[in-house]
Amino acid sequence: MTGKKHRLGVLISGRGSNLQAIIDACADGRLDAEIAVVISDVEDAYGLERARKAGIKDIFIPWKKGKRKAWEADAAGILIAEGCELICLAGFMHIVSEVLMGSFPNLILNIHPALLPGFPGLHVQQKALDWGCKVAGCTVHFVTDDLDMGPIIVQKSVPILESDDAGALAARILEQEHIAYPEAIDLVLSGRTSIEGRRVKISPK
Ligand code: GRF
C-alpha cells in the first residue's frame, strides 16, 4: 500500500477487544490506516492499556453526569487535532450527540452485538436467547441520532446452539465482531460505501 495512511480515532469504555482487532488489522496491513488516538471515559479501561502497548496515544477524559456535550466537545477537539478521518466506537458506553456527529458527519461507526434492527440497546445476547432466536450476530453501522439504528455496513451471523447461555453466545458473536469491524472500516476508508436512504450501497473493488 502506498501514500499516507488514514487516521482513525477510537472511543472506548472497557476491555477493548474490538480496539485490539482494529490495532491488529492496521498492523498486518488489512487496513491502510493507523489509530491516531484512543479516548476513554473510564480511567482504568483495559483498552487504554492495549493502546499503550501498541504505542498509540491514549487519553482519558473523565465522564461527568449531565455533561455529555462538554465531554464530546473535548473529545472532538482532540480527534480533529489528531487529524482523524473516521471515528470508531468500540464498546463506548454512551449515546453520541450532535456535538460529535456534527464534527464527523457520517464518519462515526459503531459495532453492536446483535443483528440490528433486532435487539438494540443492552444485554442483547440474553434477549436473543430469551426470544428463542436460532441465529444471532453482530452489526457495524454508521452512527445516527437514532440509537443503534444507523445505516448498516456489515453484518455477520452465528447460529444459536441448544447449549448456549448468554456468555457462550457473546463469545461466539465477539469472534465475528473482530472480523466485521476491520472489514467495515476498510469499506468506508476505501470509499466503497454510499448511503442511500437506509441502505449502504457497497461498490465493487
Ligand atoms: C462489544 O460486544 C461491542 O459489540 C459492544 O460492546 C462490546 C465491547 O467489547 N458495543 P470490547 O470492549 O470491544 O471488547
Image (tube, rainbow, N blue to C red):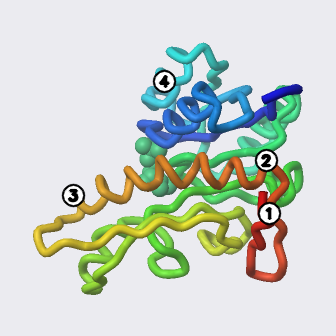
Q: CA distance from mark 4 to mark 2?
A: 23 Å
Q: Are marks 4 and 1 in contact (CB under 8 Å)?
A: no
Q: CA distance from mark 4 to mark 1?
A: 29 Å
Secondary structure type for disc 3: helix
Disc 3: which residue: 168
Disc 2: which residue: 189
Q: Which of the two discs, 3 and 4, labels the residue nearer the N terminus?
A: 4
Q: Which of the two discs, 4 and 2, labels the residue nearer the N terminus?
A: 4
Residue that extends furthest to the left in the rendered view of this protein: 163
Task: Quadrant for the N terminus, please.
Answer: top right
In the rendered structure, which amino acid carries the disc numbered 2? Leu
Disc 4: which residue: 50
Q: Position of residue 90 (x, y in %)?
A: 55, 46
In the rendered structure, which amino acid carries the disc numbered 1? Thr
Residue at x 80% of width, y 53% of height: 107
Q: Residues within 10 Å of mark 2 (few under 14, many from 20)?
A: some
Task: Say which mark, if any, is on residue 193.
Answer: 1
Q: Are marks 3 and 1 in contact (CB under 8 Å)?
A: no
Does residue 103 sit above or below 95 in this rendering?
above
Does residue 90 sit above or below 143 in this rendering?
above
Secondary structure type for disc 1: strand
Lateral position of residue 156 relative to residue 129, left or right: right
